[in-house]
Image: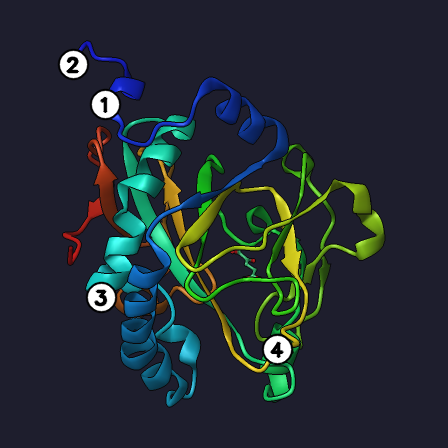
Amino acid sequence: MSGVALGEQLRFPLDAGEVEAYHRDGVIGPYRLVAPEVMAEMRKRIVDEIIVPGAQLEDPHVDYHDRHLDHETVCRLCRGPELVDRIASLIGPDLLIWRSNFQIKQPLADATGDEQRYTEVPWHQDGAYFDLRPPVWVSAWIAVTEATIDNGCLQVVRGSHTSRFDHDVDGTRHSFHQAVPTDAIDPDDIAVFELEPGEFVLFSEYALHGSGPNRTAEPRIGLSPRVTVPFVRVTGNPLYAGLDRARHAPDEPRQMGLLRGSDYTGRHHVVPLPC
Ligand SMILES: O=C(O)CCC(=O)C(=O)O
């Protein structure tokens, strides 16, 4: 360990006020990861190589998860120092990515079956879905397309991350089957994150969040890397664990990508990343 303070090792550190704001609100941003024109090129690759082929599968969710493990463009987005350095400012220098998933919202008019319900994401806390012990991780929401009120951008309830909300369970939903009733939320606390392509926000494991339907004619696409620290135990295959689900039984360690620093516990199944 060098004697240099972490902030001085980072190209994109958060300042003390931003760190305080994240811990107060459970969310921070937006920040820029890549320029809009760079994201336009990356989006083309993502659509052609992941989203279109995935839509041919019986369960597209398999292909839309954990592509940082095998797709260079997804890996580069998840590893961008603009993103990783800011997460390091929040939870420390040793960071592992344990999951990523695309958030694809089809136009309401085109969506059918469960996809139609998915155009609206009910209020929920990710901590209700994932069993990390202790529950410590930061999620990013990266805009692959623009995200607006009209196409259903991410909304986060500021300050909600320090409470546990009761979730109602709707087993008929394919995705987001656990939801917090809207009347549990004070509308004054809702932060709406309209993002340009290439921008991102960071939010904490228990930040209550959701999004409205996509009322435009184009899909809305986001990418959510989930990043934790080595002392956290991550096993099993949470819902829609994608490629990793195919490779591992529930009690086996997940495939983890080292984003910076080291796995000082030596307990994680760290795999090489394709970028
Ligand atoms: O993409 C959305 O609208 C919701 C995203 C979400 O629930 C998440 O990133 O955990």
Residue 3 sits in which quadrant?
Answer: top left
The percent coordinates of residue 35 (x first, y second) are 34, 54
- Going from N to C along the chain, the mark reached first, 2 or 1, is 2
Way the structure is coloured: rainbow
- Going from N to C along the chain, the mark reached first, 4 or 2, is 2
Can you identify the residue that label 3 sits on?
71
Badges 2 and 1: C-beta atoms under 8 Å apart?
yes
Q: Quadrant of the C terminus?
A: bottom left
SS at circle 2: loop
Q: Which circle marks residue 2 in the picture?
A: 2
Find out if the beta carbon at label 2 lies less than 8 Å from the nearest ligand 1 atom: no
Q: Is residue 150 above or below residue 165?
A: below
Q: Residue at x 29, y 60 (%)?
A: 38
Can you identify the residue that label 4 sits on?
216
Nearer mark to the viewer, of 3 and 4: 4
Q: Residue at x 61, y 43 (%)?
A: 207
- Comparing 97 with 164, the one in front is 97
Determine the CA span between mark 1 and mark 4.
42 Å
Q: Residue at x 27, y 78 (%)?
A: 49
SS at circle 1: helix
The percent coordinates of residue 66 (x first, y second) are 33, 62
Count the marks: how many? Answer: 4
**Kind of residue indicated by mark 2:** Ser
**Kind of residue indicated by mark 1:** Gln
The percent coordinates of residue 150 (x first, y second) are 65, 68
The percent coordinates of residue 14 (x first, y second) are 41, 27
- Going from N to C along the chain, the mark reached first, 3 or 1, is 1
Determine the CA span between mark 4 and mark 2.
51 Å
Determine the CA span between mark 3 and mark 4.
29 Å
**Kind of residue indicated by mark 4:** Thr
SS at circle 3: loop
